Image: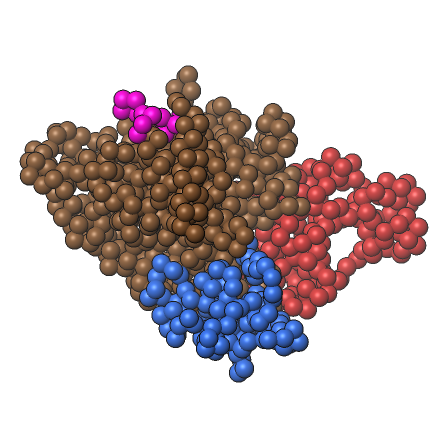
Chain colours: A red, B brown, C blue
Amino acid sequence: MTLIREEGAVKDRFTRADTLDAALEIDGPALVPLTIAADFAKARPGAEFGISVPGSTPIEDVRPHLGGATLVAVEFPAFADGRGFSLAKKIVREGFAGTLRASGPLIADEFADALACGFTEVELPETMANRQPVQQWLAARATMSEHYQTGYGRGPSILQKRLAARKGA
Amino acid sequence: MYRYDEFDERFVRERVAQFRGQVERRLDGSLSEDEFKPLRLKNGLYLQLHAYMLRIAVPYGTLNSAQLRQLAHIAETYDKGYGHFTTRQNLQFNWPKLKDVPDILGLLADVEMHCIQTSGNCIRNVTSDQFAGVARDEVEDPRPTAELIRQWSSLHPEFVWLPRKFKIAVTGAEHDRAAIKVHDIGLKLKRNEQGAVGYEVIVGGGLGRTPMIGKLVREFLPKDELLAYLEAVMRVYNSEGRRDNKFKARVKILVHETGEEEFRARVEEEYAKLDGPTINAPDEEVERIAAYFAPPAYDTLPEASQVLDQARAIDPELDRFVEQNAFEHKQPGYIALTISLKEIGAVPGDMSADQMRAFADVAERYSFDEFRVTHAQNLVLPHVKKDDLPAVHAALKAAGLASANAGLITDIIACPGLDYCALATAKSIPIAQAIAKTFADRERQKTIGELPIKISGCINACGHHHVGAIGILGLEKGGRENYQITVGGDATEHAALGERLGPGIDAEDVPAAIEAIVETYLAEKTGEESFIETVRRTGAEPFKAGFTAFVESRAVNSEAAE
Amino acid sequence: MAKDHRAGSKVRGDRLPAILMASHLLEGDTVFLSDGGWTLDPTAAKIAHDAETAAVMEAEGKAAAAANTVIEPYLVPVDLTDDGLPVARHFRDAMRQKGPSIHPDMGKQAEFAPLD
Ligand code: SF4
């Protein structure tokens, strides 16, 4: 797995575990499926953990865990499945301030969109990272410097910039 | 019309560079074909039967002469000297090379054009009424709304990987020429009882394999809430639209399966969570865009033109042309003129580079440098002085663009079909050509009157056959091309889907079958009824009977010949 | 036009003889596998008369696709003319061998000797 952020590749602090037993064996933060998140939190009170949720998950199912988890990994079954982008928007809207991860076979051309929808990082299978190394991701992110949609990305939208220019003039 | 500012300009230039990089990464293997395909589609590039095809966005069908001249230049430099106007108000080139596409995009950017989202599972190029700003029955010009949506939907970070394509149409008029009831979202500008302007919002219409008429989801949406409401609809669709079966992935299926009321509730629930003011366009921005669509500097003229009246009296060809192709303008002394790209025997929607240049000259000189593309694959000169019509007609005639058949039985919509399209199951254009030849006689066309025929070469329905007064669908049956015929389809405010008349027939039989259908109409019609009005009154039954009789007589003839 | 490309055509009966048809990635033209690589000329297409040859050709097509030279290669069942030239049995593949029926001045039919 390769983990990519805006500034480049980073090390993954989290270890994935599919069962509660496996999760309890882990030193350091565990990344667990939504279904065992509550049990894990009970068994290891105060321990740092992340939850893994398919992009198709309704926000109602994610919401109860957003207070406890410091990482939410949204799983993309395929690069062309855009549900994860909407789920990210909804998670951010809930006030989640931890790390939001897009996980799956995404392509570099989606990096800017993922960041604009609120993701912090992308976790790639190794086969993808071999074909599209980190440099391609960073280059792809920088291709478009402007966006029209207000409420996405960090900088102001084109509509906001026009308004500011008008007010300043 | 709208002109790019520095932001729009930079956006489109960067998009060109982005695509150039994507092509390079495809060639060096960084992107697989499966990954590259949706990326090229989102930039309008298809792979067809013989070559690539590039679809260029004509936002809400509006162009100027410099743009058309550039298209002519591209057609000659990178293609085979012609372009094809589509049922989505766009333009396609049928022979570009992948290696040339980035340069073509650069040339397009030079004239404020692009190919963004003319294909792929994203929000497509927004379409509108070809008589926007001209029609008398208009509440408000729909083009500023369409332009706002064009900007908002361009490379939208959240909505570029939808379950399926998504088409939005806007109209500002009472009479719907934008087919809003058969779009994923249809918007109609209207006034509420207090006189405020807003939108009627229709969701879930569409053609294709499962044609449906859209459902009213919002009776009145205040105008300044548009983008936030669209975001809510798109988020519900992106999250919940089906992804397990591409034939059930359009929003119409979601609306249908969820139920109209429940779908509406989910949209409203999502909408309630949004912080509208942070999403919607500021008033200043809406006004900035609208200012580009202010009426041009018309001369003050009397409604009637003596010059024109006299010219019509001595030139029957001009007279017919004006009678058939003119559309009433709200400004006295002006008309809008439909330019039919349906000369008898020609390919519907095709235009040569020479014709483009000639037409650009006419638009520049006589129509405030502006023209429109219609979803019937024709063009419109929106603001022609009646006094200028004789000169305009002469110039058009010299360019082979003066066919006086707008709206008649020979003004046929046809998708590219098997002559180009990789998805086709049957030919489409040759059928249109054969029908047009059959009904070439002018008097006969006039007697039959308004009769939109629409032809698709497969179930995807790009030729909109479901909403043709006569619809023709080409399929493959037993290794042969086979055509199903429907009547009663309508894309206007009376939106209706056509009803099938009987079994499919061979290509050779289509023109005679259409003749049989027309005979039924002429026998059934009362008074001044048009074809569609007659079908609406009588239902499909008499047409089925006539068609069945035709099919039986064919069977007898072919047996006798054996 | 709808989104997905449809490679291959439904043909009933014999799959042989066959030729291998694809699209050239960079140019977009329809190309055929010949004895000496890919050709634009439909009359120069290599003909598989037996299943083994067809399988070898198909593998060659897959390799060329993997090498980013062609896209969507597939075997096309053909009939042979008196001169031994391959004419696709399905009307869709035959259209690709010739070019658009509405433009005899364009495509293969304008550039190469006719197949029949
Ligand atoms: S209707 Fe079918 S054949 Fe016609 S253009 Fe669309 S996909 Fe192609």
Count of all numbered marks drawn on residues in the image: 0
At x 16%, y 33%, the residue is: B333
At x 68%, y 58%, the residue is: A105
Q: Main secondary structure of the magenta part?
A: helix
Q: Viewed as shown, does residue C64 lie left or right of B18? A: right
Q: Who is closer to the viewer here, A131 or C61?
A: C61
Would you place residue B415 above or below residue B39 in this image? above
Residue A109 visible in the shown view: no
The residue furthest top is B193
Magenta includes B88?
no
Magenta part of the chain: B522-536
At x 31%, y 27%, the residue is: B523
Would you place residue A9 above or below residue B148 in this image? below
Q: Viewed as shown, does residue B377 lie left or right of A80? A: left
Q: Quadrant of the N terminus of chain B?
A: top left
Residue B493: horizontal and vertical position, in percent?
41, 28
Residue B502 visible in the shown view: yes
> Where, by quadrant of the figure, is residue A38 drawn?
top right
Residue B241: horizontal and vertical position, in percent?
62, 40
Q: Who is closer to the viewer here, B208 or A131?
A: B208
Magenta includes B533?
yes
Residue B170: horizontal and vertical position, in percent?
42, 35
Q: Viewed as shown, does residue A127 lie left or right of B203? A: right
Residue B137: horizontal and vertical position, in percent?
31, 27
Q: Who is closer to the viewer here, A140 or B372?
A: B372
Would you place residue B10 above or below residue C29 in this image? above
The residue furthest bottom is C36
At x 59%, y 27%, the residue is: B260
